[in-house]
Image (spheres, coloured by chain):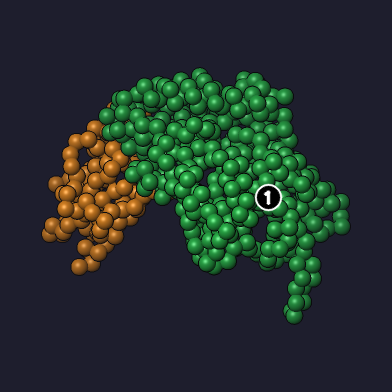
Amino acid sequence: MTTINENEKEIIEDFALFSDWEDKYEYIISLGKELPLISDQYKNEDHLVRGCQSRVWLHAEKKGENIVFTADSDAIITKGLIALLVKVFSDQPAKEVAKTDLAFIDTIGLREHLSPNRSNGLVSMIQKMKNYAVAFSAK
Amino acid sequence: MKNNVTDIRKDFPILSTQVNGKPLIYFDNGASAQKPQAVIDSITKYYSSMHANIHRGVHTLSQQATQAYEDAREAVKKYINAEHSEEIIITRGTTESINLVAHSFVKKGDEVIISGMEHHSNIVPWQLAEVNLKVVKVKDNGELDMEDFKSKLSKNTKLVAITHVSNTLGTINPVAEIIALAHALGVKVLLDGAQAVPHMKVDVQKLDCDFYAFSAHKMYGPTGIGILYGKKDLLNAMPPYQGGGDMIKHVTFEKTTYNDLPHKFEAGTPAISEGIALGAAVEYLNKIDWDWAAKHEEELLAYATEEIKKIEGVKVIGEAKHKAGVLSFVVEGAHHYDIGTLLDQMGIAIRTGHHCTEPLMHRFDISGTARASFAFYNTKEEVKIFIDALKRSLKMLR
């Protein structure tokens, strides 16, 4: 079982291989295209994280001490970024998720996607992931 | 007169910068236009050599600043051909201009007609004023349904508040006809001119509109300032919008008397540097050959529309016969957010989303569009690069 930090490190290493924006985005898009990240029953209003432009659905489940996330978006780049977040945070101890600040987004040069102005729902999604983690670890 | 795009581009320093390592192609003019050097210089000059508060100081700086600010009002008056300079109310922008009218011209329960293509800023102020809103339908091609308008307009209507040019569709509405129909029944008309002023010269007397609202930043001027033009007799009859300094004649705890127009509607210290810079923007626009600009923008739009339609799966939203500066589109199998993100990587700035026209999005049953909007400083070469970049983006996304 890898830790949050190890997951982040792995992504940073993957992205270090890309020499230009096109390779980088092609990879993110391929992540977005890969798999349905959430069960259809959770793709509803209750699980919707509102962004001005793209919509994000997020579901969290408890698995022992760990928290498991599934998510999706209607925009493929957002979905690719979500795949990265899920990869880092999912099936990790809720306590760790609650207290870890993600550094990898910045390091791999995708910081602009997390600026409040992007309105893609990602910022709210990370906040929501943490809220779930706080709630789960308090139980 | 300025009628050469190569020369005009030199007046706008930002147009020769790079974004993400690529020469900037700025197609988000509908959101805000770039500024010529003259506007930028006027702000620097104001703060470097003449800043003081206006309308009250006896000292030289205050008098100079007041003069410069009032000169700007005069410049705007001439530019839109208002009859009196006190008909030019300086506001924070189109949004505040419309809110002012919604606050001071109508009252709860009045009947106000708007259209289905309005920006939220010409919807929500009326909802806050609790008027009885009637919404004119938009046709499939993005034109206003004039039959629907005629059926809704009556002597009971207090105000028609309609956009001159649609920010999402580019439709130029038949405002002369709307005004004539409304006036025939004694109904007043407000035009939201935010998207019109960057593309054409507006003559409020010729239009005979009762109110005309617009923002400086969309007409190559500074942000945070705009205009409400209103006919003098209407403005005189309206109560103040906000209270504070500058808008009063005398204040006692028992009774306060209000200042005359335009100051009655301009409470507090205004955006002085922005006001003066708006004057500089108007001065710049006075040098533009508008016949040339209209033709140039029309060519850009026609070329872009023609080329974009050749791309498989692209649908243009808004195909009115008369359009200005806006190309909105959706693409099968590609989200507008993704398109905007990839174009940005190639140095191209477009707008994506609902463009603050959510009801219009519902009308067309879409969640948003990608929108390229042009200004007179854009070129055919830029459109060509944009089309190629769009094709490249779609190849990645689909």
Crowd class of label 1 (few under 14; some 14 to 19; many from 20; radius 10 Å): many
Residue for point 56% across, 52% down: B161
**Residue B22 percent across, percent down from the top left:** 47, 25
Nearer the observer, B137 or B200: B137
Q: Residue at x 46, y 24 (%)?
A: B304
Can you identify the residue that label 1 sits on? B229
Figure colour of chain B: green
Chain that is coloured orange in the picture: A
* Circle 1 chain: B
Disc count in the image?
A: 1
**Above or below: residue B389 compared with residue B225:** above
Q: Position of residue B56 (x, y in %)?
A: 81, 59
Decide if residue B294 is in sight here.
yes
Compared across the picture, whether A74 is left or right of A113 comes to: left
Front-lying residue, B128 or B376 = B128
Asked whether the viewer can see residue B349, the reply is no
User: Could you tell me which quadrant the C terminus of chain B lies in?
Assistant: top left
> Residue B164's x, y, as percent?
57, 42
Residue B26 at x, y percent in the picture: 52, 31
SS of the residue at dot 1? strand
Q: Residue at x 54, y 67 (%)?
A: B108
Which residue is more in the foreground, B65 or B209? B209
Q: Quadrant of the N terminus of chain B?
A: top right
Considering depth in this image, is B87 or A45 the residue closer to the camera? B87
In the displayed structure image, the side of residue A84 where residue B117 appears, left or right: right
Query: Is residue B127 depicted above or below A70 in this figure?
Result: below
Which residue is situated farthest in the bottom direction here? B254
Q: Is residue B362 above or below residue A34?
A: below
Q: Inspect the image, locate mark 1, and give the three-letter code of the amino acid beneath it.
A: Tyr
Q: Residue at x 59, y 39 (%)?
A: B196
